[in-house]
Image (spheres, coloured by chain):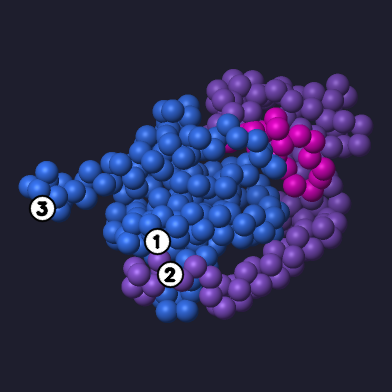
Chain colours: A purple, B blue
Amino acid sequence: MEEGDLGRRFFTFADGILIAILVVIGIALCFRESIPSEKLNGYRISVVGHPERELFLINRPPSGLVSVAGILGNSIVEWDAQGRFRIASSPCPNKLCIQMGWVSPPPGVCCIPNGVVVECQGSDWYFDGETK
Amino acid sequence: MRRFIANSRLNDVVMLGVLSAVAASLQMLEAPLPRLLPWLKPGLSNVVVLFGIVRFSPMFALGIVIVRSILSGPALGMLFSPPQLIGLAGGVAAALAMTLAMRLGGSFLGLAGISILGAVANNLAQLGTVSIWAGSLFPVWFQLGLMIFVSIPSGLLVAGTAHELIRRTL
């Protein structure tokens, strides 16, 4: 394609087909994720590059709060009564992890600058760990 | 001035500097803007990258991505940090995807399709980098469906702006 063609041609029929395909893929992926997966078996809190700080919780902690020493400093992970969790406090510069708010299982939440990862553990994960 | 213009290599270096500065400025400008989701950005600096691919070359566009990342890193307080690496991976992937789309599908795709494919590649590369960084068990792919939806308006916005820029500078 010549430079001049792109200067003139903004949207083509093929672009429309591409958008339609992406919409279908997007809907399929969102639908797949909305199906409840395996039973929640607990939470794994880890710090990137520091395997010794890895923490497994079977249930929500009694106080509802866990302090994790990350790369930049301490992050505080908070749970509510419904089992949802969030990063309540973090020393990262942009605080995007805090702005993510409450997260419902099964996915997780992570603070990239501080290296803190909180993820939900399903039953499949444990089977993999025990049988392989 | 005539001598400067005649020196095409120097001209390219100057253009790379100017366009990278524009791309970094756009990245810095959109950083404090209110967002629908915390991680959601329109990726306006990709306008300059797309312009670079069309008007110059894929290598030139890749240069813009790298220099933009170096310039915006200190300004956004994330030089050599994981978010910068993730952004760089996304930018490189977008530039490569747009180049491939232009080379392979240029006869039937418009600027909109090329830009949307770049936005999808950007998001995929960012998710992939987070997945590798955080460990393979971290479920980042649950956001893939949402990110594909987000790529469409973001790609159209970038393509619309780049189209106008290319049209005015032909």
- Circle on res. B6: 3
Question: Mark 3 and mark 1 in contact (Cβ < 8 Å)?
Answer: no
Q: Residue furthest right?
A: A81
| Residue occupying image coordinates x 70% and y 64% | A26
Q: Which residue is mark 2?
A: A8
Q: Is residue A28 above or below residue A55?
A: below
Query: Which element carries disc 1, helix, strand or loop?
Result: helix
Q: Label 3 crowding class (10 Å Cα cut-off): few <14, some 14-19, many 20+?
A: few
- Mark 2 chain: A
Q: Is residue A61 above or below residue A100?
A: above
Look at the image and give the residue range highlighted in magenta: A96-112
| Residue occupying image coordinates x 84% and y 37% | A84
- Mark 2 vs mark 1, CA separation in Å: 7 Å
- Mark 3 chain: B
Query: Which element carries disc 2, helix, strand or loop?
Result: helix
Q: Which residue is mark 1?
A: B167
